Image (tube, rainbow, N blue to C red):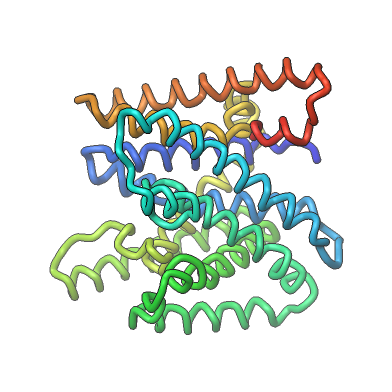
Amino acid sequence: MERKKNIDILRVIGLLCIILAHVVPDDGIIFQIRNFDVVLMIIISSYLFIIKYNGKSKVDLQYLIKRVKRLLLPTWIFLLIFFGILAGFIHYEIKTIISTFVLHEGIGYVWIIRIYLIVAILLPLIVPLLKNNKRSTFYILVLYFIYEILASMNFFNINILFEDVVAYVFPIMLIVVVTYWIMNNNNRNVVVFSMLNLVICMLCFLIIYKVTGQVENTNYMKYPFRIYYLSYGFFASGILIVFFRNNRITNFMHNKLIEFISKSSLWIYLWHIFFLVITNYFNFNWMIRYIIILIFSILVTYMQNKIIDILEKSKINKNLLNIFRG
């Protein structure tokens, strides 16, 4: 499949924003502005799946196995390296290590891998429905409405399975529906949709302020994703998607560094966790810390890819080596 420059740029923006969130900027406005990142990344994954499997009536099991391996194996290998290196410096309890490997809580930061896994499982189920059954969109919207009611009643807090998996199924289904709709609509309609979501977000903000008496950013309804969080994500993502549909802008901004970061986004994300933990022990300004984490994460990933390039010339299994890419 031919690389799409706008997708490369959008993925890099999403990745940089997620890493920025983990650095925790002092300015709450900056933290809020970037709080569309996960929604955007799910939209990108959905978009690429829809494009790749366009016209296919069904997706075989091989896709799912391949996708799960591509997410889990690099994550587990990184965690082995992470805990192995830091074992002599930081004491992690066994339950923290296990919790991290099963993508629950643990050291944090790996929850998004769990989200990607849920997306990978849902896409082959939802996309054929959207293509073959016009009513499926309506049914998913109804399910999401029911989900919002149940979430407001803390229904999904009954156990870890519901809290970590089931609670995210319905909002992710909605994001896939929105992605499919955006792909089949022009810029004007997408902008109108984005503005509508901004209005919804502002209404949610006012209602939450009225109820709690406090100013809450959209993270207030991020775990799991609810309408306050999603509406802002749809607003910002829609505007960015329209902006980077412009070929002149895309061609101007796209370069080899953008392409590399996009291709290597998973490992850059994983390595940022290591440098995030390390820099936590230094009294850096958040902006300096952010730059350090980005530079070292990208640099280590680049060196890792160069080593893989060398090893590929030997008789080492290429499928095994590919685990360390992307």
- Identify the residue at horizontal 39%, vertical 26% (top origin): 293
- Nearer to us in this view, 322 or 50: 322
Q: Is residue 253 in view?
A: yes
Q: Is residue 238 in view?
A: no
- Identify the residue at horizontal 37%, vertical 24% (top origin): 291
- Identify the residue at horizontal 59%, vertical 64% (top origin): 178
Corner quadrant of residue 105: bottom left
In the image, 205: left or right of 98? left
- Identify the residue at horizontal 76%, vertical 78% (top origin): 133
- Nearer to us in this view, 149 or 185: 149
- Nearer to us in this view, 282 or 16: 282
Q: Is residue 26 above or below residue 206?
A: above
Residue 147 position in % (x across, y down):
46, 79
Q: Name the quadrant of the C terminus.
A: top right
Corner quadrant of residue 143: bottom right
Residue 135 position in % (x across, y down):
70, 82
In the image, 240: left or right of 245? left
- Nearer to us in this view, 22 or 89: 89
Q: Is residue 259 above or below residue 74?
A: above
Q: How many marks?
A: 0
Residue 24 position in % (x across, y down):
28, 40
